[in-house]
């Protein structure tokens, strides 16, 4: 008994963990002959580990999930004919609705083109530049407020970061529009 306590103390000092309580129990209930065989026979150790792992809750759960997946796969295979029939119905519906959908698409496309003409590249660049200037002025005003003592550091940092983030986001958009129209 004293020897066992010494071993446990050594393990704790070394920071090592012992076997799990379930494995500890299984080893304690294993015969001496079997333990001696485990010490000398690598195949016996592998078999022992396989037997132990197969009895864990995780292994049982995995087997249950595999059985359910197999059942679902079988159901899917059984439904293959129904799926094919539905695909045929969808093909018929698509072909009959194609002309009306195409006309609607062309109308929407022409409306989009008209809107895009009103907000062409140069107009959009100008609007973005104006919004950038407003944000730049607002962040400069925040800086002046901080220096004048009208706003605290915490409130300044939060508001200033928000304004500068919005400014840089607009600047990136403006650059994208400028370079995409070149």
Image (cartoon, rainbow, N blue to C red):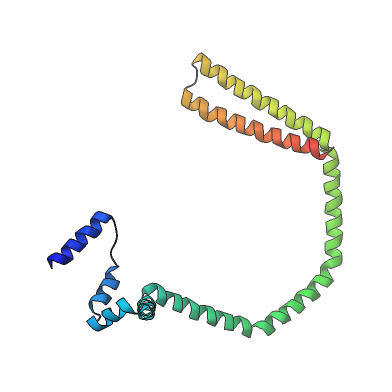
Image: 178 above or below 96: above
Q: Residue furthest left?
A: 2
Q: Quadrant of residue 86?
A: bottom right
Residue 75 in the image: x percent, y percent? 58, 83
Left or right? Give the position of 158 relative to 15.
right
Could you tell me which residue is drawn at 62 percent across and 24 percent down?
138
Q: Nearer the viewer, residue 128 or 106?
A: 128
Q: Quadrant of residue 74?
A: bottom right
Q: Nearer the viewer, residue 105 or 59?
A: 59
Residue 83 in the image: x percent, y percent? 69, 79
Q: Quadrant of the C terminus?
A: top right
Could you tell me which residue is drawn at 20 percent across and 63 percent down?
7
Left or right? Give the position of 67 relative to 118.
left
Q: Quadrant of the N terminus?
A: bottom left
Left or right? Give the position of 56 relative to 170.
left
Image: 82 above or below 7: below
Could you tell me which residue is drawn at 25 percent across and 74 percent down?
25
Left or right? Give the position of 69 relative to 44.
right
Total count of labels: 0
Residue 89 in the image: x percent, y percent? 76, 78
Q: Nearer the viewer, residue 55 or 38?
A: 38
Q: Nearer the viewer, residue 49 or 32?
A: 32
């Amino acid at each position: 008994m004293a020897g066992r306590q010494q071993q446990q103390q050594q393990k704790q000092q070394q920071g090592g963990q012992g076997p799990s309580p379930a494995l500890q129990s299984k080893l304690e209930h294993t015969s001496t002959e079997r333990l001696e065989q485990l010490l000398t026979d690598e195949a016996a150790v592998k078999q022992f580990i396989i037997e132990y792992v197969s009895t864990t809750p995780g292994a049982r759960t995995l087997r249950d999930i595999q059985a359910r997946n197999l059942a679902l796969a079988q159901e899917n295979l059984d439904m293959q004919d129904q799926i094919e029939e539905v695909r045929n119905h969808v093909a018929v519906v698509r072909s009959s609705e194609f002309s009306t959908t195409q006309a609607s698409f062309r109308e929407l496309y022409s409306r989009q083109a008209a809107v895009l003409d009103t907000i062409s590249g140069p107009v959009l660049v100008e609007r973005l530049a104006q919004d950038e200037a407003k944000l730049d002025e607002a962040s400069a005003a925040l800086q002046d407020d901080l220096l004048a003592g009208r706003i605290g550091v915490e409130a300044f940092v939060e508001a200033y970061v928000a304004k500068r983030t919005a400014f840089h986001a607009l600047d990136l958009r403006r650059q994208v529009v400028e370079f995409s129209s070149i």
